[in-house]
Amino acid sequence: MTRLQSTEIKALRAAAPPLPLIPAPPVSSDEYKSPYNRTKPPAKHLDHHFSLESRNFTGSALKKGSSPSGPRKIIPLGTGRPTADYYPWESISLNEASPEPTSKSTTKPNLQSPKEQEKCHSANTITKHGLTYNLSIAMNYGFAHGSAHLLRFITEHVELIHNPPYTDWATFLSCGATAATELAFRIFCNRGDTILAEQYTYPGTLESAALNGINVHGIEMDADGLRADALDEVLSSWDDAQSPRPHVLYTIPTGQNPTGVTQSLERRRAIYDIAEEHDLIIIEDDPYYFLRMGPYQDTQGTNGTDTNQSASEDDEAAQIYHSESIPSYLTLDTSGRVVRLDSASKILAPGLRAGWVTASKQIIDKFTAYQEVSTVAVSGPSQLMLWHLLDENWGHDGFTTWLVHLSREYRWRRDVLLDACNKYLPREAVQWNTPEFGMFLWVKVDWTRHHRLKSLSGLSLEEVGAQIIGLEERVAARALEKGVLVTKGSLFASNQERNGHLHFRMTFAAAEEGDLKEGVRLFAEAVCEEFDLGI
Amino acid sequence: MTRLQSTEIKALRAAAPPLPLIPAPPVSSDEYKSPYNRTKPPAKHLDHHFSLESRNFTGSALKKGSSPSGPRKIIPLGTGRPTADYYPWESISLNEASPEPTSKSTTKPNLQSPKEQEKCHSANTITKHGLTYNLSIAMNYGFAHGSAHLLRFITEHVELIHNPPYTDWATFLSCGATAATELAFRIFCNRGDTILAEQYTYPGTLESAALNGINVHGIEMDADGLRADALDEVLSSWDDAQSPRPHVLYTIPTGQNPTGVTQSLERRRAIYDIAEEHDLIIIEDDPYYFLRMGPYQDTQGTNGTDTNQSASEDDEAAQIYHSESIPSYLTLDTSGRVVRLDSASKILAPGLRAGWVTASKQIIDKFTAYQEVSTVAVSGPSQLMLWHLLDENWGHDGFTTWLVHLSREYRWRRDVLLDACNKYLPREAVQWNTPEFGMFLWVKVDWTRHHRLKSLSGLSLEEVGAQIIGLEERVAARALEKGVLVTKGSLFASNQERNGHLHFRMTFAAAEEGDLKEGVRLFAEAVCEEFDLGI
């Protein structure tokens, strides 16, 4: 199928009407999709998935009437939007330098745009009444979908990367993936519902589900992530008399948090087929999609030379654009049953509190309705910074260059951590896999090796669980005492009561090179001392 | 009672420990309150007001352990917070010029700080690793309460202005008052509950209540706002067998939206007494508190000279600091039953999506718990801009100077609008009051003057309502066709079905001077044409 290429964006934009320069224009990502979408089939009607709360909810009546469109001037006595004359910021200047690589083995990405070279009050300065996206718009109330200028870029990005195979998809800007997950639960679930998720998953999701009265049923995982056969088994044997049949699957398919595993293409297809068969909504929480580290080769003794570095930047960029090997669920989604959550947190900066959601229009309309009566819109300064960086400065190809650069940096960090694990962790009691995406290493400790816990055969599952929790707490406390913070695996267990394993999660996202090594060494010490193993 | 003065802030800060410079430090506004608070009595325990959903909810377990405090260096392998090395912004420069007055009758406020005079890359430039609040902190994940640097200023501000009369109050940064209102409903109300509110109120609140399955019972108003006697009557005659007794009052006490009325001190006391007697939580939504315009004198024929301008800036600043005449509910709140919502939208800029909530610690803990699993924190760029403007540049006295300036600007705008109303609106069919706070003018049109609606005596309340809605739509459509947007009053009716009145809301916040006049003229034309009145 012919699809949008980044080289076509310029012509596409030139042929479109100019972007509106009024406060909170009622825009939709539909306006920024390419004509290629018109030939696709429509999404299925999936309204029956909406919760009782969201079913009839259409958002804010006041906001719908507050920005009349059209070329005529309308005197605004309608909405209480303070005039930009009263915003005490005249301009903002952004210095978007390419960061220096932190790894000796990566090179500085070629992201120097001509604009960057200029001095203060250049094109990097955004003024109150500039001729494009400016402070008078960004600092005023915004439309729930997002500002026209940023939404255009993000919509193009989604089409370039994911190219959803149905026609009426839409994207909107969210206040981050955590906020979007919470909205998704309210849109699709009633209190008392059960959702399906990986057996270990992001604790914020578990807490948000609990808050909304939703049970989480964890599905077992293997080296390819969530097991399709286990998912099918749970659904096929569900006792409808006991509790409502799950109709939502929440999954982190790539560089899963906390396990670091990535679902293969085959696995994704199998899970999508089950979703089709059992009519599931798939919430695809995918913040680590672009952190692509690939296989690991032990760099011990090779003076840190990273042989993976040999792939050219162009090859890696091509992989990001056309990743047939690991497509997103959105790319596979012929029915419109996937709700894809993207986040700026892991690829640009978490403090932006911004991300985007892509799904069928009927679903996105619910997200924007909820946003209208809560956060209203993503912070204007955050949108402005994202737009200026991505659209004015980098463009789509520059963004890809950045993502390739980040992936290399994360590969280097991952390798430093794995090298240290190989060096320090006691293999007789500790296991780990190689994460090929993301920022987490999931470490399994064999608690049966503990001198006092070796034989718990006489105990109930509950009593064993309590013993493991106690052990976990002691290891984590010992590690913290030594000066390293790791995260206890039990926080991630969907099925707390029948977890029965001892895990720790380590991230290579934050610490410096030396600290990554030292952190693993200290953690290894804590384990060895607690388990009475020789170091 | 002795209370904090702005002149004491410097010494208070000097005696406190330095502000933390790590990502997401677990801070609380308690750390920034003055010692005067220690002598106050504690808030009452009001846990019985929490909803079933919020009662046992304490927030994110992962976040609680992710920023260990203390002087020791801890290697961060715990939380997936990307290193600041990967944020593609090196610095941000803010040009916080004092806006020029838009009114000929107001003068430029004296807000020129020495820093403002400097050039690019001066103190107005915030770098990634600067020695105070910087990009490495602001662009990382933030703690739900807010960043230490901004939270300190806001806590001091709340104490200076409102000085809550109990000891364990707390403030946290919200993603705006609309988001905070939604959280308040979830914290206090179960589905099926009824809350009390003004008979006309902010539609976002009505929609948010409906979304959460909450009924709104509108209380009648008079020239002093929500009627205390009507509130008492509703509560005293409540039929508990029919539906759960309301235990939450939502009120906009100052420059009420949409009516523009402000509750007098006497009225506030009477309502607070009823809240004490009937054990109500008061949600005080007060975004217009600082837009203080005072009485109106017809300026027609006096060449626009504003006689109110004679009050000195110092007098007006003193009024803002010690407004015994119109205190907030928070100031009157001896029990800790008030949840005060402040917003940056109307006094700085709506695009920030930021505000603050003040209440007893037990209640604020719920707000932060909800924020932890949804928006996580207010946008870092928004917090950074607020902090730099308020704390680095203006200080508390500068902020007051700004608020006095804004009040004068709004007074001038209000007077332009009222002058135009006096000149153009047909008095035989249209009534309005003088708003002394806020940004809204509420216009009542006597529908019985309509030639076709004069005698609807034979019709039911429902049929009359339908007639009025039709008329309202025609007037608004006619006005829009002429080029002016006004807001239909029915959007604000708490009790839609028994409204029975025809209102329009006009704001003087957004349009330019000439447009304010022309807008009223066009609206008057629309009314006169629809009512067949001579112009």
Image (cartoon, coloured by chain):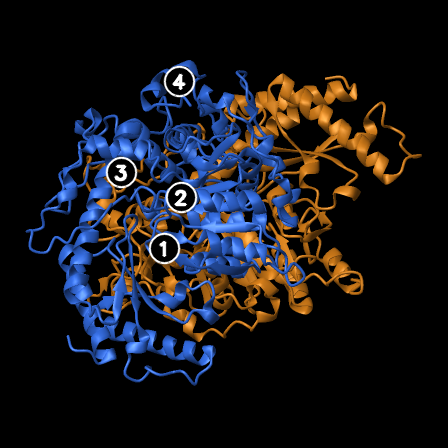
Chain colours: A blue, B orange
Q: Residue at x 51, y 21 (%)?
A: A38
Give the chain letter at badge 3: A
In terms of secondary structure, where does tag 2 sit? helix
Residue topped by disc 3: A403
- Which mark is drawn over residue A127? none
**To which residue does mark 4 refer?**
A12
Q: Earlier in the sequence, mark 2 or mark 4?
A: 4
| Residue in view at x 53 percent, y 36 percent | A336
Labels 3 & 4 near each other (Cβ < 8 A): no
Q: Which amino acid type is marked by label 3?
A: Leu
Q: Secondary structure at mark 1?
A: loop
Cα gap from disc 3 to disc 4, whole angstroms: 24 Å
What residue do we see at 20% from left, 43% from top? A408
At label 1, counting other C-alpha atoms closer than 10 Å, the crowd grade (few under 14, some 14-19, many 20 or more) is many
Q: Position of residue B303 (x, y in %)?
A: 52, 24
Disc 3 residue crowd, few under 14, some 14–19, many 20+, Cα 10 Å? many
Same-subunit check for callouts 4 and 1: yes
- C-alpha span from label 4 to label 1: 37 Å
Task: Specify the subunit that label 2 lies on.
Answer: A
Residue A70 found in image quarter: top right
For the residues bearing labels 2 and 4, Cβ distance under 8 angstroms: no
Closer to viewer: mark 4 or mark 1: 1
The answer to whether B458 is drawn above or below residue A295 in the figure is above
Q: Secondary structure at mark 4?
A: helix
Q: Which residue is mark 2?
A: A266
